[in-house]
Amino acid sequence: KLKNYGLRSSPGFVYQQPSVLIGRTDVASVTSWLAPIVWEGTFDATLIDFIYKKQNLTIATTVFALGKYTRFLKDFLESAEQHYFVGFRVHYYLFTDQPEAVPEVKMGENHILTIRKVPSLNRWQDISMGRMDILEKLIENELAGEADYIFCLDVDTKFYGRWSVESLGRLVGVIHPWFFEAPRHLFTYERRPESLAYISEGEGDYYFTGAAFGGSLEDVLHLTKTCREQMNIDAANSIEAVWHEESHLNKYFLYNKPSKLLSPEYLWRNINAGASQIKTIRFSHVAKNNADVRPN
Ligand code: 2GW
Ligand code: MN
């Protein structure tokens, strides 16, 4: 007679058998340092939800909307409420110079929004790079005991599909939608050795977007602190990396390998453009008229 170790059939509901043999064959779903790369078809949403449900996690999520970028908030927030960590605890921290311009969006169960006023900035590069400093302070001073994971997202974006617990990990990077098929010498890393974001032509793993990254509080604190320090040193040396904090983020990920990577499903470039490997678009940049939203 078989012993059952006092357990009921675990985990107590029926789901498809995971296969040792069958998986995605058109894309890599693991890196050379054995971090998963998340694509449609690599996880069972029902099963992974079940596993994480018991942990009662809170996902802090930051977004910045200064100047004309407040116009993106309505679609960002409304679509997030349709697709982003539905059924899990989410605390959005929205940083803006115009709290009065934040639209009223109905939050789902266990989702809350905190609005923080920040000073307006003239140079857009300072808005983009300044996020690292604000994130560092937020995590350091406020999030301990309040959240378990954090994601930091661009606001000129919209959700179209599920983004949930399958994305959680210690340190999470998202592969940039323009470069996933490119050899590394073509990546838009910072190529001037004078910048601390410098990566030579023969180095690099993937090109990561600055528009979405995350992980545990501890790991993202270290990331934001390091990028902020490196950008300050660059500034003191009168150099600014070609893609600002995105360049420093890529340098950081070269030395601190992400424990999980999200495929370009998690930041696509344009909802109307396709690629055979992209079976579902979860989150995408929205088309923006730069001349219209970028005064300087
Ligand atoms: C204004 C003029 C020009 C560029 C940006 C801005 C601007 C940005 C702004 O007026 N107000 C504002 O709130 N932002 C915030 O910065 C907003 O959250 C936005 O999503 C984020 C990054 O700027 P964005 O979305 O225009 O940059 P992308 O989509 O062209 O960016 C990539 O490269 C950037 C660095 O150059 C960042 O790394 C970004 O995360 C990347 O996606
Ligand atoms: Mn953007």
Image (tube, helix red, strand yellow):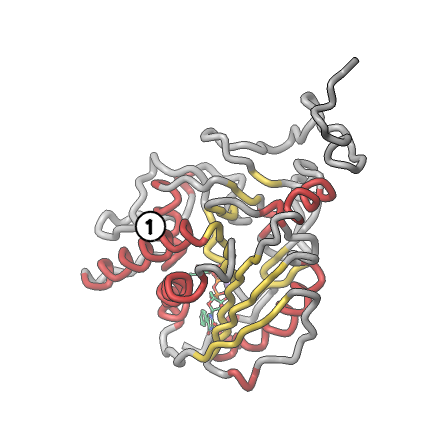
Which is nearer the eye, 77 or 175? Answer: 77
Give the answer, above or below, for where 230 lies relative to 128.
above
Residue at 41% x, 39% y is: 257
Label 1 neighbour load within 10 Å: few <14, some 14-19, many 20+? many
Residue that carries the numbered disc 1 in the rendered image: 190
Q: Dividing the image into 4 quarters, which one contains the C terminus? A: bottom left
Specify the farthest residue to the bottom.
Answer: 100
Mark 1 element type? loop
Residue 224 position within the rendered picture, expressed as x and y whole percent measured from the top left: 37, 57
Residue 254 position within the rendered picture, expressed as x and y whole percent measured from the top left: 37, 41
221 relative to 43 in the view: left or right: left
Residue 278 position within the rendered picture, expressed as x and y whole percent measured from the top left: 66, 44
Give the answer, above or below, for where 285 lies relative to 13.
below
- Name which quarter of the figure residue 1 lies in: top right
Which is nearer the eye, 55 or 103? Answer: 55
Which is nearer the eye, 170 or 8? Answer: 8
